[in-house]
Image: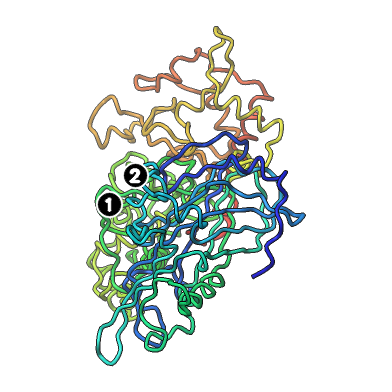
Amino acid sequence: MRRIFTRNPLSEVPFRAWAMVLCGVSLLTLGAAGQDLHLEIVPMVDGQVLRLNEPLGLAVAAQVTRLDCLLSGLALQKQDGTWLESQDWFAYLSTAEGRVSAKVSGMPEGVYQGIRFRIGVDETTNKSDPNGYEANHALNPQVNGLHWGWQGGYIFMALEGRFSKDGKENGFSYHIANAPQLMTVELPVEFHGGRPMTLAVEMDVQRVLKDIDFAKDGTSTHSRAGDALAAKLKTNIEHAFRVRSVNYDVYQKPAFATEPAPLPAGTHALTPAMTQRFPQVQLPADNPLTQEGVALGRQLFHDTRLSVNQTQSCASCHDQAHAFADARRFSPGAQQQQGRRNAMPLFNLAWQQSFFWDGRAATLREQVLMPIQDAHEMNETLPKVIAKLSADAECTQAFAKAFGSAQITSERVAKALEQFLLTLVSQESRFDRAVRKVAELTESEKRGLQLFVTEFDPKRGLRGADCFHCHGGTLFVSQSFASNGLELAEDDLGRMAVTQNAADRGKFKTPSLRNVARTAPYMHDGRFTTLEEVVEHYSSGVQRNATLDPNLAKHPEGGIQLTTQEKADLVAFLKTLTDESFTGTAATAAR
C-alpha cells in the first residue's frame, strides 16, 4: 500500500456535500456543484467476471456462493497529494443481487491522481444503532444483511462458498469485520473531475484467497481478537484491487420484461456499455448476452455460407465504416439481384420496436433471418444454411460454447445474431462528449444545434429547422414512421404494404441521425448523396401529399427557406453526431 497522504481540511469543504445513490435508489443530494461519479467494483476470476457457484481455478475445487461488502470513506487525491474526502458516504455491494456500483453526486472539477475507499465502517458507525437508517440506506440491515444483530457491528465483507476435498463437499464462511480488519484500498489513477464518470475497479477473487489453505487456516472466521486468518484475509483483500477503466460517462443496468433465463453452461455474461443518457433499455430475457454468444453472432454476421452461393454475408451490405450501412444506393443480392431500398444502418437496435424501412419485422430476432431467405438478397433456405454450418466442426464447436450443446438450429442462428447486433451501441460522438463537457462545439455547430431543436414559427419569433419533431431525444429518433415529402413511387407503398392502411402510404421508418455523415446515400431509396441535398429537401423541396407529416405540412408552400449560412450550420452540427470509435473498430463496448 502507498502512504495515505494527509488531507487538507480546507479542500474538504466542497466534497463534504457529496451524497450517494446506490443502484438507482437516490438519497438526498446536498447541492454541491459537480458531476456524478460511479464507482464499480467488478469481482474477477482468471480475467473473467466472477460467476457465483462456478469453479475458481484454485488448487482445490472451490466456488464462491456469496460475496457482499460495505464501502465507506470515498476520497479523491489531488495532484498536490492532498485528499478530498466524502462525509457519511456508504455503499452496499452484492454480487448475487447485481449491486456492483455506487453513485456519488457532486464530484468537483479538477485533475486527480488517485482514489481511496474503505471496505467496512469506522468504529463509531460500527457501534451505532443500525435501526435508525432510512429504508433504502446502505447501512440498513434490511438492505445489506450484514449486521450481526445481537453480537453488534457489521460484517465488512462476507465471502462464502464451497469446495471439494477427498470426494467430500465442504464449505467456507469468511466474515471479515471489527476495527482491526477495517480495510483501505488506495489506487493510483488519473482522471478529470467535474464531468460524468464511471471508474471501474477489479477485485481479483483468487488474490483474496491467495495462500489460504482450508485445512490449515480453517474454513471460517468471524474476525475475533487475535484471529490470524482474518488478518491474512485483510491483507489479501487490500492488495486484490486494480483500476479496470475510466470512462467519462455513466451507464445503465439493462432491464428485462421477465426474469432472465440462466446463462448456458460455461458461458460468461456480457453487459454492453449503454449510457444512462439513453432511455432505459430492455433486453430479451430469453436470450441473455454472453461473450460466447456475441462472438458467435459476430462470426455469423461475416459468414458467406448464409447466402445461396456462399458469396454474401450480412457484412457485405452493412459496412462498419459506414455505421453498418451500405454506401451503394441499392445493395445487390448474392446473385446480383437488384434491390430497391437502401440498406439501413445497424446501431442502437436495442431501442428499436420494428425493423426494415416498412417495419415488417417486429423484433430483431425475426429480422435477422429475413435477408437470408429474401429472393432479392441472400436467397437461401434456412435448412440449407443449417446443413452448411453443421458440416463445419469449428462452427459446431462455436455453437456448443455459446449454447451449451453443438446443435445448430435457425433459432440459435437468430439468437446469436441478435446478441451481436444488440452490442452495436453508438453513443460516443463529439456531440456526446460536448454534452459531458469533455469537448466543445464550434460556433457554427452550436448555431446548427439551435436550428435543429427550434420550431419554425415566424409568427411567434421562432426560426428553426423543426428537425427535433422526428429526430428528437438522445437517440436522435422520436417518431416511428413518417411521410417526409418525397415524390411517391407507385410501386413502393412504404408502411402501407404492411398495414394495408391507406393512411400509411408513403410512410417509412424514421432513421436515427447518429452517424448520419457516414450513412450516405440518404432516404429509403438512397436518392440523396449528400447531407447538403437532404437539408435542401427539407428547406425547399418537400412535396405535399395526403399523408405528409403534420410537422412538415404546417410549413409554407415554398418551404422554410433556410439561408445559406443556416444550411451550412445545420450540416456542421449533423457531422458532430459521428461516433468515430463506433465506425472505426469492431470491438464490442462492454463493462
Does the CB distance between marks 1 and 2 fall below 8 Å? yes
| Residue at 54%, 74% in the rendered image | 235
Q: Please, what is the three-letter code of the amino acid marked with disc 1?
A: Glu
Res 174 → quadrant: bottom left
Residue 520 visible in image: no
The tag earlier along the polypeptide, 1 or 2, is 2
Q: Which mark, by number, is residue 366?
A: 1
Mark 1 crowd level (few <14, some 14–19, many ≥20, 10 Å Cα): some
Q: Residue furthest bottom?
A: 166
Residue 238 visible in image: yes
- Label 1 to label 2, Cα distance in Å? 9 Å
State whether residue 495 is above or below residue 51: above
Q: Mark 1: which secondary structure?
A: helix
Instruction: Locate residue 395, reporting x and y percent.
Output: 34, 75
Res 317 → quadrant: bottom left
Which residue in the structure is indicated by mark 2?
A: 355
Instruction: Locate residue 589, reporting x and y percent.
Output: 50, 58
Q: Please, what is the three-letter code of the amino acid marked with disc 2?
A: Phe
State whether residue 268 is above or below residue 431: below
Q: Is residue 30 left or right of residue 415?
A: right
Q: Residue furthest right?
A: 80
| Residue at 24%, 61% in the rendered image | 411
Q: Residue furthest top?
A: 459
Instruction: Locate residue 232, reporting x and y percent.
Output: 50, 78
| Residue at 38%, 48% in the rendered image | 350
Q: Nearer the viewer, residue 3 or 324?
A: 3
State whether residue 154 is above or below residue 65: above
Mark 2 crowd level (few <14, some 14–19, many ≥20, 10 Å Cα): some
Q: Mark 2: which secondary structure?
A: loop
